[in-house]
Image: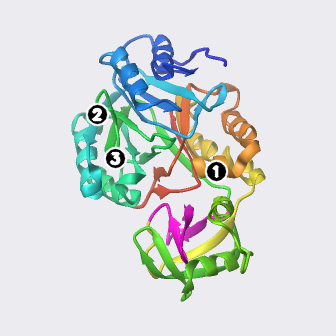
């Protein structure tokens, strides 16, 4: 693969495939910086935990944070098994917070991790963003975001995602972690833009969640959820095995409209009897829309989040970008994934900055309001 280093005055990115990909990608990114890094974000995919731990040990005291994904995103395109990394220069300041065994109280864990990260920097002197690196096995990620919001407040944007891959893992504090919350507060000398988009389109009529429990939707409009869902997306009475149902659900998530005009897409992981198993909690009495998403729509919307993020920079060119793309979008795109990533990267135009990203199991994007948990979304952070 192309492994040339991308660099600007404040950032540099690198990528690698194969064994020791995390260490190699990080070193390539570091080679592009004129001085020591304030922060390195690394997004490995396809590596076992012991391999990641060995890579971190070999890097010494380099301040690395990140998560594993269902593939990484580099300037060269999608990296199925390897790592993409971006190093941010000493003009930035970064603070870190890690809370392990977060499943006991995910909201409190995220609040503590975020507070620790923000307390480590003087974020009053620069634009600040908090990255959250989560593990969906700890529980509903909306709880983590609520905790982070309680610590960060309404003026600090949140971005990030949850670990993916066959062995989901988080990286923080020089260690490989599971079922933790990793928070990174970044104070950046330039402006920060955050953009998000999805390619889902409404079908059928909206419904009301009449019974739910945890991450399961038990009933829609008073009917068993699976029955009502299949009817709502245009497949009434379809007889599907579990695998067939999961494949159908990838391209037909639910969407939960918000009062501010936004909507949060809710990924359906599968079914449990007559209940829908969702990626996050949908409360009773919530309105939901049935949606569909085609490969063409995934590709079409790939650059929208990039445009939204770069437009927020007030005309300044981006110096760096971090991308969180949903693994559900990747599955929906199927054979079109190369086109989706090409469209995503191409949206930066000729002045594409150093960048790194991954395919996540849930995305975080809070621009306004207290809610930021996303599914089936592409999230872009642009740094001027």
- Of marks 3 and 1, which one's residue comes earlier in the chain? 3
Quarter occupied by residue 245: bottom right
81 on left or right of 42 = right
Q: Secondary structure at mark 1?
A: helix
Q: Position of residue 281 (x, y in %)?
A: 43, 67
The residue sitting at 49% across, 29% down in the picture is 47
Q: Is residue 305 above or below residue 239?
A: above
**Residue 89 visible in the snapshot:** yes
Write down the region rendered in magenta.
Answer: 251-280
Q: Which residue is mark 3?
A: 179
Q: Who is closer to the viewer here, 126 or 244?
A: 244
Q: Secondary structure at mark 3?
A: loop
Q: Which residue is mark 1?
A: 329
- Kindly report the distance in space between the C-alpha atoms of the residues bearing marks 3 and 1: 24 Å
| Disc 3 and disc 1 in contact, CB within 8 angstroms | no
Q: Position of residue 301 (x, y in %)?
A: 69, 50
| Disc 2 and disc 1 in contact, CB within 8 angstroms | no
């Amino acid at each position: 693969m192309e492994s040339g280093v991308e660099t600007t005055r404040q950032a540099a990115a690198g990528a690698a495939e194969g064994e020791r990909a995390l260490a190699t990608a990080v070193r390539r990114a570091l080679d592009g910086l004129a001085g020591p890094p304030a922060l390195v974000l690394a997004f490995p995919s396809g590596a076992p935990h012991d391999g990641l731990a060995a890579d971190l040990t070999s890097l010494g005291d380099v301040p690395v944070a990140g998560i594993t994904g269902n593939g990484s995103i580099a300037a060269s395109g999608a990296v199925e098994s390897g790592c993409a990394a971006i190093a941010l220069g000493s003009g930035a300041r970064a603070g870190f917070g890690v809370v392990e065994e977060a499943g006991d109280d995910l909201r409190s864990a995220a609040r503590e991790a975020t507070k620790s990260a923000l307390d480590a920097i003087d974020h009053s002197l620069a634009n600040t963003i908090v990255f959250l690196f989560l593990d969906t096995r700890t529980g509903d990620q909306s709880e983590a975001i609520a905790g982070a919001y309680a610590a960060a407040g309404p003026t600090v944007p949140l971005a990030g995602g949850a670990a993916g891959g066959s062995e989901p893992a988080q990286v923080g504090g020089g260690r490989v972690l599971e079922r933790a919350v990793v928070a990174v507060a970044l104070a950046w000398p330039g402006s920060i833009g955050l953009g998000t988009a999805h390619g889902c389109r409404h079908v059928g009529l909206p419904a009301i969640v009449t019974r739910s429990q945890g991450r399961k939707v038990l009933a829609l409009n008073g009917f068993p959820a699976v029955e009502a869902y299949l009817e709502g997306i245009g497949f009434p009475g379809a007889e599907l095995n579990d695998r067939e149902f999961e494949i159908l659900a990838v391209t037909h998530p639910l969407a939960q409209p918000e009062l501010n005009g936004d909507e949060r897409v809710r990924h359906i992981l599968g079914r449990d009897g007559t209940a829908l198993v969702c990626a996050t909690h949908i409360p009773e009495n919530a309105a939901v829309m049935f949606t569909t998403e085609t490969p063409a729509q995934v590709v079409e919307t790939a650059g929208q989040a990039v445009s939204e993020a770069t437009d927020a920079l007030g005309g300044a060119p981006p110096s760096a970008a971090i991308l969180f793309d949903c693994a559900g979008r990747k599955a929906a795109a199927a054979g079109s994934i190369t086109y989706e990533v090409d469209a995503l990267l191409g949206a930066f135009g000729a002045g594409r900055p150093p960048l790194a990203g991954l395919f996540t199991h849930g995305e975080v994007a809070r621009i306004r309001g207290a809610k930021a948990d996303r599914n089936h979304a592409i999230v872009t952070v642009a740094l001027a």
